[in-house]
Amino acid sequence: MRLQVKCVDTNITIKIENNEKEYMRIDLHSHTTASDGRLTPPELIDRALGFNIEVLAITDHDTTDGLAEARSYIADNNLPIQLINGIEISTVWQNKDIHIVGLNVDPESPELKALIEQQKQHRVGRAEMIAQRLEKATREGVLEEVKLIAGDAPITRAHFAKWLVDNGYAKTMQQVFKKFLTRNNPGYVPPTWCSMSDAVTAIHAAGGQAVLAHPARYGLTAKWVKRLLAAFVEANGDAMEVAQPQQAQQERRTLADYAIQYKLLASQGSDFHYPSPWMELGRNLWLPSGVEEVWKDWEFQTVSPSE
């Protein structure tokens, strides 16, 4: 038996073919060419279907530009997948880049659009500074060439990373961040994003839920992760990501316990950017016992097999 999901606005409709209970494949963190992903929105949808994903959130960095194309593609082809309107907002906390995912947001929300425009201006200025610093360590023309990589998407550090790898300054995307784009390295520029509170407020104004993205990926000690969670709760955040593909079971259990301790809902997502053996869509995504899912109050509808 397979759960067939049909796109109906923001509700999740499930066609149940018999009385068995079956695990539903949900991935609530992914990227397209609207930001720093390498697949177009239709290509991402096709790949998600290939991995039997039934509910997918597109959460591009500081933009909702890919959502309309993805939703039209699903509707035009009557595809069995539910799209969740999402965004991943860059924030700064204690001088660190912290990302907050918004789920079920209204892309036309005036408050969200205003924040996106503000973030766009910050991103342009930061890209210029990163390029200037990288030119001192590499060669001239960095910004112009990175703009070609980004296309119409806002320039992110991942675009600079791809340029560095493509031009032989590092072998892998992981290596390039450690060598060039993190603190005390040639291309590092301190973040100037909005606050966590501003991001959460905009997400709530857009009717969405605010989710702290990958809390174990910021290089923080356990003590600092707890401080981050406390600050996120103080900012009225709703949930935290607990499950990711490349993750030790103990880390997942610890994050689940933190979600319970701080009374946050639990989310799961691959943070997919491009096809990879390590961060594939929907891979190894499940939530440990004891947590409340971020989708617990989403509207699930059972329809008859004739529909």
Image (tube, helix red, strand yellow):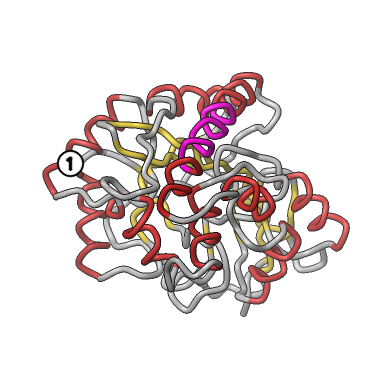
Find residue 21 and report its horizontal and vertical position in percent: 51, 71
Residue 281 versus residue 242 in the image, above or below? below
Q: In the picture, residue 18 is in which quadrant?
A: bottom right
Residue 61 versus residue 253 in the image, above or below? above
Q: What residue occupies the far right of the structure in this picture? A: 76
For mark 1, does the 10 Å Cα neighbourhood hold few (<14), some (14 to 19), or many (20 or more) residues? some
Q: Is residue 120 magenta?
A: yes
Find residue 137 and report its horizontal and vertical position in percent: 40, 53
State the residue in front, 293 or 281. Answer: 281
Q: In the picture, residue 232 is in which quadrant?
A: top left
Q: Residue at x 66, y 24 (%)?
A: 109
Q: Residue at x 57, y 33 (%)?
A: 124
Q: Secondary structure at mark 1?
A: helix
State the residue in front, 283 or 195. Answer: 195
* Residue 292 in view, yes or no: no
Q: Amino acid at mark 1?
A: Lys
Q: In the picture, residue 255 is in which quadrant?
A: bottom left
Q: Residue at x 67, y 33 (%)?
A: 107
Q: Answer with left or right where residue 174 lies relative to residue 276.
A: left
Q: Answer with left or right where residue 66 lies relative to residue 235.
A: right
- For the C terminus, give its image quadrant: bottom right
Residues shaded magenta: 119-130
State the residue in front, 172 or 101. Answer: 172
Q: Answer with left or right where residue 304 lies relative to residue 202.
A: right
> What residue is shown with label 1?
226
